[in-house]
Amino acid sequence: MNRQDDYSLTMGSYSPNGRKYAFAFFSIFSLLFLSYSNSFDCSWHHDDYANIVSNANIQIEDLSWQNIEKALYGIAGMNRWQRPVAYFSFALNYYFGGLDVFGYHVINFLVHFLTTFFLFLFIFHTLHLPLIKHRYGRHAYSLALLSAVLWAINPVQVTSVTYIVQRMASMEGLFYIMTMFFYLRGRTAETLKMRIIWFGLSTLAFILAVGTKENAAMLPMSLLLYDVILIQGATRDALVKNLKYTVPCAIAVLLIGFLYVGDVLQFQQEYKPRVFTMTERLLTQPRVLLFYVSLLFYPISSRLTLIHDIELSRSLLDPITTLLSLVIIFLAVITAVLYSRKTPLISYCILFFFLNHAIEGSFVALEMVYEHRNYLPSMLIFLPISSLMIYGFSYYRQKKGMIIILAAAVVIVIIVQGVSVFIQNDIYKNEISLWSDNVQKSPRLHYVSQNLAAVFFVAGRLTEAFDEGHRSLGLSLSARSAGKGRTHALLGEYHYLRGEDDRAMFHYGQSVELDPSFHPSYRRMSEIMLRKGRLIEAEDMILKAISIKSSSYAYHAILARLLLQQGRPDDSIREARISLGLNGNQSEPYALFSDAFRMKKDMKTTAHFQKVAEAFRSRTQTQ
């Protein structure tokens, strides 16, 4: 959209001197560092495990192309690149620091800081566009800095910064705002050389944004609206002239979506494990969007959590707030469009918010609510608020008392926001603090209670795990049958460790009845039957586990032991070999080989494998 010759964009000398840039840079860094200083040792949480901690694809030992390409596929098992830029950044973190959370938090913090600084630059240069310079140019520096800071230290952003895996949201935000800033510089550059450089940087940042998260598909539309509303002016001629660009922008959105999804028909399949239908999601999202707005302007700790409990909308009138939310959003968007010529800046900020919620707030089968989804859409939402604050300073510039009151109010807001961020970070310190807090704020959700029970169990707090697990079974809200099945599996594990086999078998049985694909329960049932001497039933159970997860070396080792006890040494050797092939760094298969050859009266081979098994055990104990 390089239409430099059509519009006069000579903006004069307006850049702040180096000192002002330096002040913005260091003040933003200092405020963010103080707010997030307690976040650098926060533990792994929730989706961190599947995406990083247990993800072999990103756990690279060298920077060979083979390892880099593996990281670009995201989670192991994917058949196409998935958010390759984000996953590659995790791979680099692992390469340099393994699973030490400190390095991951440092990168997350720097991403958030750079995003804030580029947001400041983008807003500052936007406010000097000829169309709005007369209204905002005089206070552009203060406006840009204040609105960027209010956005950056809003507690809602904690999940995008402190929750490690949500680097996907913050890094996408960084490349997104870089794309827009570079585009703006390209549109206002005075020489062809500089336009080529700026537009080249914008294109590169756009590619990186798309490679980080699919939401960046909305970038072409954001830039088109920006150009029409804030650069050209939303006149009838401009709108007609730019209609031809809407089709390429829409095609770009669809193509990027297809690159990520591949098979469009799988959308409906992805709703199968959800507790809501596509219709219910579409009806509920307008209420969610207004909830997001309320969080941004009223972000107290009691309203912020990882998993929110929100009532589903069953129809336009159930609940009635569904229809009211639709009306409010419709009026907000229509008003922004109608007033886009009279108040272009405010109009664009409103449209930017709703436009960039469009993908995650649509028919895509995602969870209903997550705070990190606000990271990108909310970038400009504090600009109109900041302009009112700055206008107040200008209006009362002759009244020293009012200036002091206004300044104090701004400082208090910033301090309160920063302290709130600090408090939220403490909640993310470890899994128990996170899920305990979430249970308090969403006490009706089975999924949240189940997660708390699981982390209690991992921490060895078995009684609390048992109590919370039983409590979660009584919660039906937002409970998937598979989720309830895993709760039964956890309770089964509690009884298994206490040697209460009958109770354990009951819960494991309930587990696989509710979730037939949960193979760990079959394993435990096999082990219980094995120690009861019910070998045929034990074999049947472990075979079911293997049919679901044939790549488990432990399952094949268990089967080998069972076959040996049934007097089938050759079959046992076969399964032990499979186990060894899946994981060569274990002693159990060698012990099984030894026992099997002893059964076959081959004492020489028995002695050999016995030595190998003992060597493995000795090495393990030394380590």
Image: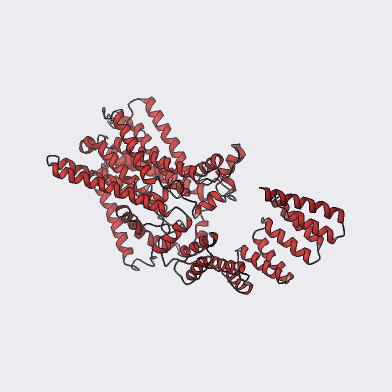
Question: At which x and y percent is residue 555?
Answer: 68, 60
Query: Is 100 left or right of 522, judged from the image as shown?
Result: left
Colour logic: secondary structure
User: Residue sitting at 36 percent across and 50 percent down?
Assistant: 421
Question: Do we see residue 358 in this rendering?
Answer: no
Q: Nearer the viewer, residue 84 or 344?
A: 84
Question: At which x and y percent is residue 496?
Answer: 61, 68
Q: Residue furthest front?
A: 622
User: Residue sitting at 26 percent across and 27 percent down?
Assistant: 13
Q: Nearer the viewer, residue 109 or 380?
A: 109
Q: Nearer the viewer, residue 152 or 343?
A: 152
Image quadrant occupied by the N terminus: top left
Question: At which x and y percent is residue 215?
Answer: 43, 48
In this picture, is 17 found above or below 352? above
Q: How many marks?
A: 0
Query: Is 540 left or right of 517, judged from the image as shown?
Result: right
In this picture, is 30 found above or below 498? above
Question: At which x and y percent is residue 392?
Answer: 18, 44
Quadrant in which residue 439 is drawn: bottom left
User: Residue sitting at 84 percent across and 61 percent down?
Assistant: 599
Q: Residue furthest left?
A: 398
Query: Is 122 left or right of 448, judged from the image as shown?
Result: left
Question: Do we see residue 256 in this rendering?
Answer: yes
In this picture, is 531 found above or below 365? below
Q: Nearer the viewer, residue 444 or 190?
A: 444
